[in-house]
């Protein structure tokens, strides 16, 4: 999903959280969690592309599905579940740090849902399996584009 959609949705969710909680901490966490999850795309570009990082090359690598392998470690239900369990167990919602983490969890969850359902709304060259966002699934398929994308 394109970054502008994640930015818009995360900003809207952050605004709603601010309105509901009257606190900037969960709103900031939501905005950060909803947008920064995509940093794993940058890491994959650096590791797998063999190209010097430039924004146009990076965007082309992602949008034109030029990748041969992709890990997307942060786009993982397994890691999201660990983050959720840790946040809910350790981060008291009564502190600003806890509110920030709860907001980050909400933002990351929104991001994952948008990716899960958004990639298959319109058929295109990067339709993914419904299992794509499980790191285990990608690992079992050697993180390979040919094995991960619907043909």
Image (cartoon, helix red, strand yellow):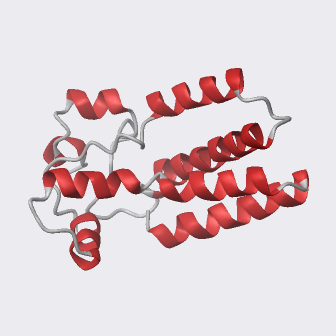
Q: Measuring from the top left, give residue 2's x and y in whole percent.
A: 44, 68
Horizontal side of residue 85 vs 128, given as left or right: right
Q: Observer-nearest residue: 107 or 90?
A: 90
Identify the residue at the far left of this view.
Answer: 50
Identify the residue at the far bottom of this view.
Answer: 56
Q: Observer-nearest residue: 64 or 19?
A: 19
Q: Measuring from the top left, give residue 83's x and y in whole percent.
A: 56, 31
At horizontal 14% and vertical 68% (from top left) the residue drawn is 52
At horizontal 71% and vertical 40% (from top left) the residue drawn is 102
Q: Measuring from the top left, give residue 21's x and y in whole percent.
A: 89, 51
Identify the residue at the far top of this view.
Answer: 89
Quadrant for the N terminus in the image: bottom left
Q: As displayed, is residue 140 above or below residue 110?
A: above
Counting labels gives 0
Q: As displayed, is residue 133 above or below residue 48?
A: above
Q: As displayed, is residue 7 above or below residue 37?
A: below
Q: As displayed, is residue 118 above or below residue 148?
A: below
Q: Observer-nearest residue: 75 or 126?
A: 75
Q: Is residue 114 visible?
A: yes
Horizontal side of residue 110 vs 123, given as left or right: right
Horizontal side of residue 91 vs 144, given as left or right: right
Q: Is residue 127 visible?
A: no
Q: Observer-nearest residue: 138 or 146?
A: 138
> Residue 138 occupies which quadrant of the picture?
top left
Q: Measuring from the top left, give residue 150's x and y in whole percent.
A: 25, 49
At horizontal 74% and vertical 56% (from top left) the residue drawn is 27
At horizontal 78% and vertical 64% (from top left) the residue drawn is 15
């Amino acid at each position: 999903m394109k970054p502008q959609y994640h930015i818009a949705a995360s900003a809207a969710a952050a605004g709603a959280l601010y309105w509901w909680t009257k606190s900037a901490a969960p709103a900031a966490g939501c905005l950060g969690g909803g947008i920064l999850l995509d940093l794993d795309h940058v890491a994959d570009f650096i590791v797998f592309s063999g190209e010097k990082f430039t924004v146009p090359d990076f965007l082309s690598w992602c949008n034109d599905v030029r990748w041969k392998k992709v890990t997307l470690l942060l786009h993982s239900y397994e890691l999201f579940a660990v983050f959720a369990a840790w946040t809910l167990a350790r981060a008291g919602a009564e502190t600003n740090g806890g509110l920030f983490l709860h907001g980050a969890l909400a933002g990351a969850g929104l991001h994952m849902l948008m990716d899960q359902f958004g990639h298959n709304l319109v058929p295109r060259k990067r339709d993914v399996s419904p299992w794509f966002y499980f790191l285990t699934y990608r690992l079992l398929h050697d993180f390979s584009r040919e094995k991960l994308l619907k043909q």
